[in-house]
Amino acid sequence: MSTEITLQMNPPLLGFEEINTYTLSPVEDNPYFFWLEADKGPKFLVTRPEYFFPNYLQQVKSLYLSNRANTAKAVEEDPDVYVIITLAEKMEEMTANLLAPLFVYRQKGQAAQIVLYDSDFTTRHHLFPPTKHRSCG
């Protein structure tokens, strides 16, 4: 995604029910992160999960599509998936919310945060997992 897009969030983000309109834009000079920002409201750092969690996207789309098949809402467009990042003082402590990804329908300018209740995902998966310490002697 190289340009910003205005999104109508329906349903609204959890905890921000009074805000429905956000702008999704790339972080300058960093192709892995994006800003999800409300006018006069919160600003979230988000990323595409496939950059950090290679198997996540397939699992999420499978869960989501099976749930969507049971609902009356039929959506033609396959969504882009983003996850909200929790910033930390140290880069290795940054986490991603894999429990409640954002599904973005770019053509329609719509988005929704979907909670994956029937999953093992949490709100705090490390983007940069600690590496195993090796013994040097």
Image: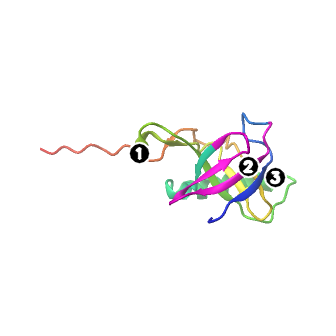
Element carrying mark 1: loop
Q: Which residue is mark 1?
A: 129
**Rendered image: mark on residue 22:** 2
Q: In percent of the image, x 74 and y 62: which residue is there? A: 106
Residue pictured at 72% horizontal, 33% vertical:
15
Q: Which residue is mark 3?
A: 70
Q: Residue 123, how many percent across, how many down?
A: 58, 38
Prevailing secondary structure of the magenta residues:
strand
Task: Name the foreground residue: 117 vs 103.
Answer: 103
Q: Residue at x 84, y 59 (%)?
A: 74
Cβ atoms under marks 2 and 1 closer than 8 Å: no
Type of amino acid at the residue the image marks with label 1:
Pro
Q: Nearer the viewer, mark 1 or mark 3?
A: 1
Residue 6 coordinates in the image, percent (x, y): 75, 56
Q: Nearer the viewer, mark 3 or mark 2?
A: 2
Mark toward the start of the polypeptide (2 vs 1): 2
The residue stretch that appears in magenta: 18-43
Closer-to-camera residue (7/125): 7
